[in-house]
Amino acid sequence: MVTNDKHTKRGLHMITAKKLFSSIIFTLLFSLAFNAQADNSMKFGDYVVHYNAFRSDELTPDIAKAYGLTRRNNRMVLNITVQKLGQNGKTIPVKAKVQGFASNLTGQVKNLDFKEIYDGDAIYYLAQSQVSNRETLKFDIKATPEGATVTANVKFKQQFFTD
């Protein structure tokens, strides 16, 4: 059916414009997320480790429940992933031995107990710890890919706000 109704044509142009706008926004958000993730990564040998820490109440209740995480404003989650660098810049998730601790500025040590989580092809290593408002944690993490002789020594610090 062919129509020359200018309202129908305008409606089709609006739908096309909305799809284009949505695609642009998605691409922009994806590139921002990729750049943010790239800042929290470290290359070692033929591997790369990605890491980030955040308050656990940023997770949805369903995600927290699925991964057995406590969801509170005074709990943080440390997320570690290890990937092998492949051809053409592609990466492949790999199993790893991940261990470490966090210490605050007064020297109190918080041992981190990592649990291995599989989500499709992805492998995550998650640990939780309690945090106080304005507490800065210095993380010291070691990640050794399964079957590899290289180890990533990741050190970073982050301040948490619980209010």
Image (spheres, rainbow, N blue to C red):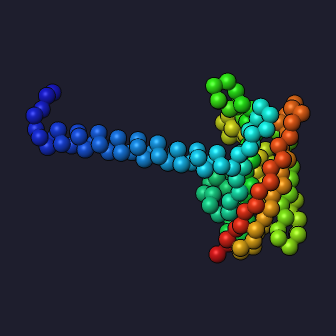
Q: From the viewer's perspective, is residue 43 above or below residue 154?
A: above
Q: In which quarter of the image is the N terminus?
A: top left
Is residue 114 visible in the rendered image? The answer is no
Residue for point 86% across, 73% down:
106
Residue for point 73% across, 36% down:
83
In terms of image quadrants, where is residue 24? top left
Apparent side of residue 12 relative to residue 112 in the rendered image (left or right): left
In terms of image quadrants, where is residue 69? bottom right
Apparent side of residue 96 relative to residue 42 in the rendered image (left or right): right
Q: Position of residue 42 (x, y in %)?
A: 74, 44
Q: Where is residue 137 in the image (x, y as percent from the top left)?
A: 78, 64
* Closer to us: 31 or 69: 31
Residue for point 88% across, 69% down:
108
Q: Position of residue 125 (x, y in %)?
A: 77, 47
* Closer to us: 157 or 114: 157
Q: Quadrant of the C terminus?
A: bottom right
How many numbered marks, from 0 up?
0
In terms of image quadrants, where is residue 145? top right
Q: Where is residue 92 in the image (x, y as percent from the top left)?
A: 70, 31
Apparent side of residue 108 relative to residue 85 in the rendered image (left or right): right
Q: From the viewer's perspective, is residue 76 above or below residue 22?
A: below
Is residue 148 visible in the rendered image? The answer is yes
Q: Which residue occupies the extreme top position in the image? A: 87
Residue for point 83% across, 61% down:
102
